Image (spheres, rainbow, N blue to C red):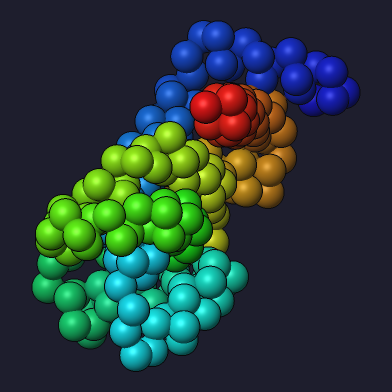
Amino acid sequence: MDSVGEALALAVRLIISGDRDVVAATSTSLSVSLTATALACLAGGPLGALLAMQPFRGRRAALIAVNALLGLPPVVVGLIVFLVFSRAGPLGALGWLFTTKAMVVAQTLLTLPIVVALTHRATAGAWRDYGDALRIDGARRLRSIAILLGMERTALVTVALAAFGRAIAEVGAITIAGGNIRGDTRTLTTAIVLETGKGEIALALALGLILVMIALMVSAAAHLLAERAGRG
């Protein structure tokens, strides 16, 4: 490749033509990240709301731990998943190592603290304002959680977008857990690292352009939702 301009032009052609490697990496990235985000939201949303409304011994420590886990090194998460699903690991019999299932587990572990922490912040104010009314109304814990989440649904969409943005940009954990297998566990981020190392700059640029476009769409959606919530 003689110039960056030529590499960029070829990258655009690869995207437009639907290059097999580009499509496969994009599809795997979206599938794994969307699944992990959904699982993290299903588990982390109610947990975050529960932390906002339910006083208990150790609650402050739990909140500190959740926020501390926001900085959990991805490669450590990947190593944990690798050890759990390796042949000698406790779940090795499942045969998930170097599959998209292990990648989903890794991304879920990484995004879960984000969902819990941001959901707690989103619902804490609503609980302060309406918690007494819910208690007087006799709402049970699960119903109160559902009401809180419903009241803050716009904020929770932003939470989900933040979790998805974190997941799809991940490279370290999913490389260890998934093995970066072409046409199977290779994602946009892992393919960019591999193709750059091989000198396939045009393909790396094509994958990078798609990743940037996805990131921009996520950021734009989050911004528009924040503006809408502010006007509301």
* Quarter that holds the N terminus: top right
The image shows residue 62, relative to residue 160, as above or below, that is: below
Asked if one can make out residue 81 in the rendered structure from this viewpoint, the answer is: yes
Q: How many marks?
A: 0
The image shows residue 147, relative to residue 55, as above or below, that is: above
Which residue of the protein is positioned furthest toward the bottom in this rendering? 57
Which residue corresponds to the image point at 17% horizontal and 63% vertical from the top-left? 141
Q: Nearer the viewer, residue 22 or 197?
A: 22
Q: Position of residue 134 (x, y in %)?
A: 24, 55
Q: Position of residue 224 (x, y in %)?
A: 58, 25
Which residue of the protein is positioned furthest toward the right in this rendering? 3
The quarter holding residue 29 reads: top left
Q: Nearer the viewer, residue 91 or 146?
A: 146
Which residue corresponds to the image point at 31% horizontal and 50% vertical from the top-left? 148
Q: Is residue 47 left or right of residue 7?
A: left
Q: Position of residue 96 (x, y in %)?
A: 22, 62
Q: Is residue 208 left or right of residue 159?
A: right
Which residue corresponds to the image point at 38% horizontal and 89% vertical from the top-left? 58
Which residue corresponds to the image point at 31% horizontal and 47% vertical from the top-left? 149
Asked if one can make out residue 181 in the rendered structure from this viewpoint, the answer is: no
Q: Is residue 36 left or right of residue 139?
A: right
Q: Is residue 217 left or right of residue 185?
A: right
The quarter holding residue 213 reads: top right
Q: Position of residue 3 (x, y in %)?
A: 87, 23
